[in-house]
Image (cartoon, rainbow, N blue to C red):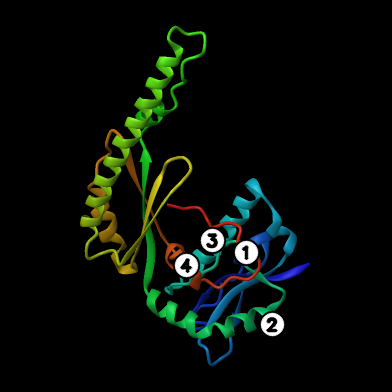
Amino acid sequence: MMVTYLYCVLTPPRVDAPGRGLSGVGGSSVRSLVIGEATGLEAWVSTVDEAVLRVTGRALASQALLHNEVVEAALATGRTPLPTRFGSHFADDERCVEGLARRSASLIDVLGQLAGTVEMSVLLVPSRRAAAKDSAAPPTRDEPSAGRRYLESLREKSHRAERAQRAADTIVARIDAALRGIARAEARSRTATGIARIAHLLSGADVHRYREAIGVFAPTDEFRLVISGPRAPYSFVGSAAPQGGHDSSSPNDNG
């Protein structure tokens, strides 16, 4: 079944239509929908086979990347888009326009707050040395004093985790101080692999200042810092992001 896939919403409409030849999810052509002339809203959409949205694994990651590339193309027009997450869709264009028109007041309000902003982020990536310690194999059952050594390894691992957390807290506090007057808001998260991510909302004009402020931080025994962005403000739209259908994934960071 063919559906209308939604990438993002922008305002004001049609300052720049999607670039000719811009492809999105499933290789579909990206186009613009005006959400009623009075609303001042534009949606970037494409018509896709709904089956494309039910993929998993690498195929899901590949399609989510295409979604993100369209949102980044919208950001490149000089406007800050209100992005959706991968999988947002409506039965057809009419349903999409109706659904967004009903929420036009709140969408306009959020787009006004985000106008001119981008999202940057800092990744605290565990050093190879720290990762190697955490991946050390526990003693086997037939080793001498295996039980005692196993408990000691658990205790040492707990101590390393506490030290790493203290080190991370120190770095985060220094980052907060360095970005005072640059970052308008922040959002924190952590991946299953132990990478801490701090996303920051800032003016697009301050990206160079942001990179300079973070660039002075040298790697530590526990972490190295990786700067990512600029990108659309995925971390700061929350429930304001227009959604239709399922919401199965958000794009990965791209540096």
Relative placement, left or right, of 172 versus 114 is: left
Closer to the chain start, of discs 1 and 2, is 1
Calculate the distance from the C-alpha at mark 4 to the C-alpha at mark 2.
25 Å
- Judged by depth in the image, the label closer to the viewer, 4 or 1, is 4
Task: Give whichever of 65, 127 is nearer the camera.
Answer: 127
| Contact? badges 3 and 4 (CB < 8 Å) | no
The percent position of residue 31, horizontal first and vertical second, equals 62, 74
Amino acid, disc 4: Gly
Which residue, given by chain and number where applicable, does mark 1 sit on? 23
Closer to the chain start, of discs 3 and 4, is 3
Calculate the distance from the C-alpha at mark 3 to the C-alpha at mark 4.
20 Å
The percent position of residue 162, horizontal first and vertical second, equals 31, 36
- Judged by depth in the image, the label closer to the viewer, 4 or 2, is 4
Which residue, given by chain and number where applicable, does mark 3 sit on? 69
Q: Is residue 11 visible?
A: no
Relative placement, left or right, of 229 versus 103 is: left
Which residue, given by chain and number where applicable, does mark 2 sit on? 94
Tag 3 secondary structure: helix
Closer to the chain start, of discs 4 and 1, is 1
Calculate the distance from the C-alpha at mark 4 to the C-alpha at mark 1.
26 Å
Amino acid, disc 1: Ser
Tag 4 secondary structure: helix
Q: Residues within 10 Å of mark 4 (few under 14, many from 20)?
A: few
Q: Residues within 10 Å of mark 2 (few under 14, many from 20)?
A: few
